[in-house]
Structures are given as C-alpha cells and as structure tokens.
Image (cartoon, rainbow, N blue to C red):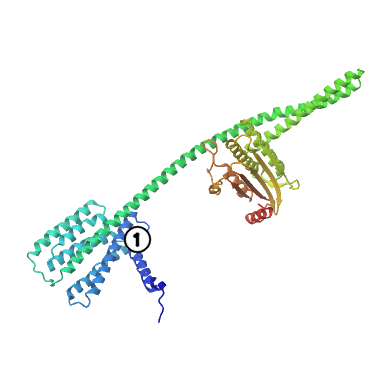
Amino acid sequence: MAHFHPAALETHPAPATSRLMQVVRQLWRMLVNIGVEDRLTVWQRKRVRLLNGICFVTIAIYVGYVLVFMNSPDWLTFRICLVGVFVNLPPFFFNYHRRYDAAAYYSVLSVTALCSFIAVARKYDGVEYYLISNSIVPMLFFRNIWKIVGLFLLNVAAYFAVREAMGVVRPFLYVADSQYFYNVNVLLFFLTLFVVVYFFRSENFRQERLLTHQNESLAESIEHLQTTQTQLVQQEKLASLGALTAGIAHEIQNPLNFVGNFAELGVELLQELRETLANEPLPESTKQALSHLLDDLTQSQQKVHEHANRASRIVKSMLQHTRASSGERQPTDLNALCYEYLRLAYHGLRAKHKDFTATLTTDFNQRLGPVPVVAEDLGRVLLNLFNNAFYAVQKQLACRPSGTYRPAVSVSTQRVANGVVIRVRDNGTGIPADIQDQIFHPFFTTKPPGEGTGLGLSLSHDIVVRGHGGTLAVASVEGEYTEFTVWLPRATDNKSAPQQATAALAHSGA
C-alpha cells in the first residue's frame, strides 16, 4: 500500500507552464513596443503601446473563437473570426513603419466598418454599444479636436445608416441560434473599453505622481541653488577679507621687523653699558643695583625680541595662506608646518572666544626629514583641519555640563612605507556615519548657514589627492571623536599613489 504524504498536496507550477508564461510575457513586451522610439513623447509612446495592446488582445480573442468554431457546424462564424485575425494585423505594420496616425485611423475606422457591416448582414440590434464606444476611442488616440469630432460624427452617422439599412437589407449572413455569440462580443467590448480607460487613468495618475516628484525635485534644486549662491557670496567676502588680511599683514611685517631689530640692538647696547659700568669707580652696592637693573632690562629686551619673532612667523604664515600657490614642491619640515598652523588656528579661535581653552598635543616624528610638498597649499589643508577640530570641540563644550568635558586636539606625524602620515584628532562632536561619505563633496557642510561654505574639505581633498597624489581619509564616531588622516608620498612619481596609500595606512594601523 502506497503511503501518501501531506507534502504531496503542495502545488508547484509545472516547469512547462512557467516557461509558457515567460514566453507569453516576452511576446507581450515585444508586441506592445513595436514602433516605440526614444524620440517619441510620453503621450505618443503611451498611444502606440495601447494600440498595440488592443490589437494583440483582439487577435487573441479571435484566435480563441477560431479554435472554438473550428469543428463547429457554424462555419460562417469560423470564417468571420478567421478574417478578424488578419483584419487586426495592419496596426502592427503601420506602427512598425512609424505611421502612427495611420494605425490609429485604421483602428477606429475598421471597427466602425466591421460593426456596421456585421450589424446589417446579421441583423444584430445593439450596434449602438459598439459605435458609441468606438466614438470615444479617438479621444485616446488623437489630440487634434477636429480629428476627434470628425471621427465621433462618423460613428454617429454609421449608427443611423445601420438603423436605416436594417429595414431595407435582408440579413444574408444570418445564422440561427447565434445570439450568444453576439452577447459575448458585447461583453468583451465593454471589458476592452474598461481596460483601455483604466490604462489611461492609471497612466495619468502615474504622470501626476511623476510631475509632483519633479516639482519637488525642482523646488529642492532651487533651494540648493539659493544656498549655493549665498555660500558663493560668503566665499567671495572671505576672499576679499583674505586679500585685505594680506595687505594688513604686509604692513604689520615692517613694524615687527623694526621691533625685533631694535630689541636685538637694545640687548647689544645693554651689554656695552654693562662693560662700561664695570670700569667705573662706583660703590659695590650701586654696582649690584645697576647689575640687577641691567639684567632685568636685558631679559625684557630678549622677551620683546622673542615675541617679535613669534609674531613675525605668524604674519608670514598668514601671508603664505593668502598668497597664490606657486604649485612647486619644495622640501618642507612638516613638523614645523603642523605646529605653526596648529598655533595659528588655536589663537585665531581664542581671539574670538577669549574664555576658550583646549589641550593641544603634538607627537612629531623627529626623524621625518624634509618632505617635498607645496607648503602654501598644504598649509591651507592643515589650517582647515585644525579649524574644523576646534569648531567641533567648541560645540561639544557648549553641549556638555560645565566641568565635565575638556577639549583636546592632537596632531601627529609618522613615517610609513613610501610616505608620511599626518593625523589630526579631536574629541569633539564627531560626524554622523550616514554623511561621512559626503563631507568631501563641494558645498556640503554640517555647519549652520553663515558659518561654513562647504568648500574647505572639498578643496583640501583636491589639494591632497590631485595636487600631491596622496589620500585624505576620515574616521569618526558621533559624539566621541573625529580623526583625519593625510598620507603624502615621499617620491615625486605618484602613479601608484592609491595602492601605496592603502599599504601605508594598513602598516601604520590606521
């Protein structure tokens, strides 16, 4: 006795049926797209596909009738259906040869002629269902109102002509007991009309949704353009301010040189005065008092000279930042460059927010050696990274309760295979993971309007990647830290820079 398993009740589509449905779908897609071209408008493509689809469905119905009546004694209906298969083929031919209006005209006029002929020849009442429905079809196929009106009036005239002819012409194609065939045709015509109207209705809704989406996209684009315009104006103001700063820095440089020179001269004069007083016959107490006074004056002059040199270096850094890049690489001490711009960014922020303090940490490789870079361009990169780091820790400080957070920014340099690595890290607000791949895009900024142009990191990326053949990467955890890693090749040939960068960063543990 055979055992029957419940699993056997599970129905699975037979492979043959599945293949047949696949063939039908492919045939449908092929037929409805006959004559469709890219140059056609959306409405024209829709019209061609709809006409092809109607012809395909109509031919399928007639083929079904042919199969049904093939062995029937009603050979007249069989022949009519067989003729119907071939009568509905011309629209495919016209569409294939880009005669779209001819296909539409043929579709409307053939239905009018066939319905009128069959109604008279077989004396079928109810021909108005065909002709009234067929008079609506031109509205789907044509845009010219006179074409629509003309075809509508043609169907109206055909209706009255058929009613008149029915009383005169004797039905010569009449077949007894074939009323069911007529009823099925009426039902199919109503069904076809419903499908056609539903198709256009759904297409119109789809076009409406598409237009709504396009309008929203245009509104977003306009808003983006307005934001971009504001940012460009802001950038132009910053550029003008940079030019003004360069002029002021040039003017400041001369007084600073005088201060430094006179401070150095003052130290030398104090030394000469000290030597002169040593030979004078003065009381010992007076000599000691004068010696202490000269020591204080010498120390004061040395401090003036030291800070004048410091101010001079800052001004020179500002001039390098505002000066157009020469584009020539020169051996540069990256440790000194990082330190100068770190101090410049820190004191620049403290000039705006005097109560702001942060822990600055440097970890420089003293064996780094000179690296061939464009100092002015790389200085812009470092200044931008430091400014972003201080901005992030300042925002984090404002969000944390007082006394619970200590801002910290660190910079380190490291030698790796075929290059050097500079890391700038802060314990600020961090960057959300979903926008980390966008921060190097032009005009993308996480700062509020007016505080950032969205060009800093984009320009920095171009300077490092295109200008120096290196890489600029970011690692961040929102609310914890952000670390930018700059890899620069030591060699001038950068054809394999991306591969070198990947190997170098992996070796350094980045």
- Tell which of 145 and 72 is nearer to you: 72
- Please report the residue visible at 37 percent of the width from the left and 70 percent of the height from the top: 23
Q: Amino acid at mark 1?
A: Val
Seen as rendered, the residue at the extreme front is 1
- Residue 199 position in % (x across, y down): 30, 57
**Residue drawn at point x = 20 percent, y = 53 percent:** 149
**Residue density around tag 1, few if under 14, some if 14–19, many if 20 or more, within 10 Å:** some
**Eyeballing the image, is 483 above or below 90?**
above
The x and y percentages for residue 466 are 60, 49
Q: Which image quadrant for residue 245?
A: top right
Does residue 477 appear in the picture of this structure?
Answer: yes
For residue 36, side relative to residue 376 (left or right):
left
- Under circle 1, the secondary element is loop
Tell me if residue 494 can be seen: no
Residue 135 spot, x, y in % from top left:
20, 57
- Judging by the rendered image, the residue that carries numbered circle 1 is 36
Which of 107/250 is in front? 107
Task: Report the front residue among 206 and 475.
Answer: 475
Total marks shown come to 1
Kindly identify the residue that appears in the image at 29 percent across and 64 percent down: 94
Q: In x, y percent, where is residue 71? A: 22, 78
The quadrant in which residue 196 appears is bottom left
* 182 lies left or right of 228: left
Which residue ends up furthest to the left in the rendered image? Answer: 168
Quadrant position of the N terminus in the picture: bottom left
